[in-house]
Amino acid sequence: MRKIVVGITGASGAIYARQLLEKLHAHAAVEVAVVCTGCGEQVFRYELGDGAFAAIPFRRYANNDFLAPFASGSGDFDTMIIAPCTMGSLARIAHGVSNDLLARAADVMLKERRRLIVVTREMPLNLIHLRNMLQLAEAGAVLCPASPSFYHHPATLEDAVDTVVNRVLQLAGLEQDGKKWGGC
């Protein structure tokens, strides 16, 4: 069974987290744990409502719970997806500042050479952001900016968001049934 940690930070784009969690819930052979920063929860509730946050179908860990199973390299979680990810969280991870569970779990993924997929949701980018992104990529993370594709003519916001979420699932090694590039 695959074990995946989903991290949610305070970047706008909680819909990416919601769609990701819904699709992960449909995978029978996946165990999911969720860690959310304080701002991540605040933005999630603001953008999607309190009911959407309460409906998260997986165990949530407090961002200060360093006893969570994925806070240690001896834990057997193989992938972490941070969606959406602020540039502040990305910077702390890139510089090894593991002062909360989200950053510690990302640090564990990097040190154990496991998958860390970071779905950034900021623009424009300044030089500090770019350097932090480069440092994180050099450490082994996969940077996956939330850039929807439009070649399949999405009809709804959810359809556009799914182009990113499906790509993230593919990067995580999970089958997904989204539309793929078939040429012009």
Image (cartoon, rainbow, N blue to C red):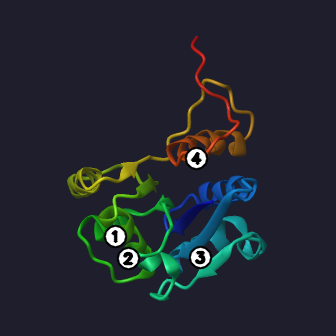
Between marks 4 and 3, how big is the CA–CA gap? 22 Å
Instruction: Check disc 2 and give the amino acid type.
Output: Arg
Question: Crowding near pointer 1: few (<14 within 10 Å), some, many (20+)?
Answer: many
Residue 127 at x, y percent in the picture: 21, 52
Secondary structure found at label 4: helix
Quickly name the residue at label 3.
41
Secondary structure found at label 2: helix
Badge 3 or badge 1: first in the primary sequence? 3
Between marks 3 and 2, how big is the CA–CA gap? 18 Å
Q: In this view, does 94 lie above or below 60?
A: above
Instruction: Check disc 3 and give the amino acid type.
Output: Glu
Question: Crowding near pointer 3: few (<14 within 10 Å), some, many (20+)?
Answer: some
* x 28%, y 56%: residue: 136
Residue 122 at x, y percent in the picture: 42, 54
**Contact? badges 1 and 2 (CB < 8 Å):** yes
Residue 176 at x, y percent in the picture: 66, 40
Residue 100 seen in render: yes
**Contact? badges 3 and 2 (CB < 8 Å):** no
Q: Is 69 in front, or is 15?
A: 69
Residue 37 seen in render: no
Q: Is residue 152 above or below residue 130?
A: above
**Contact? badges 3 and 1 (CB < 8 Å):** no
Badge 4 or badge 1: first in the primary sequence? 1
Q: Is residue 136 above or below residue 180?
A: below
Quickly name the residue at label 4.
169
Instruction: Check disc 1 and give the amino acid type.
Output: Asp
Quickly name the residue at label 2.
104
Instruction: Check disc 4 and give the amino acid type.
Output: Leu
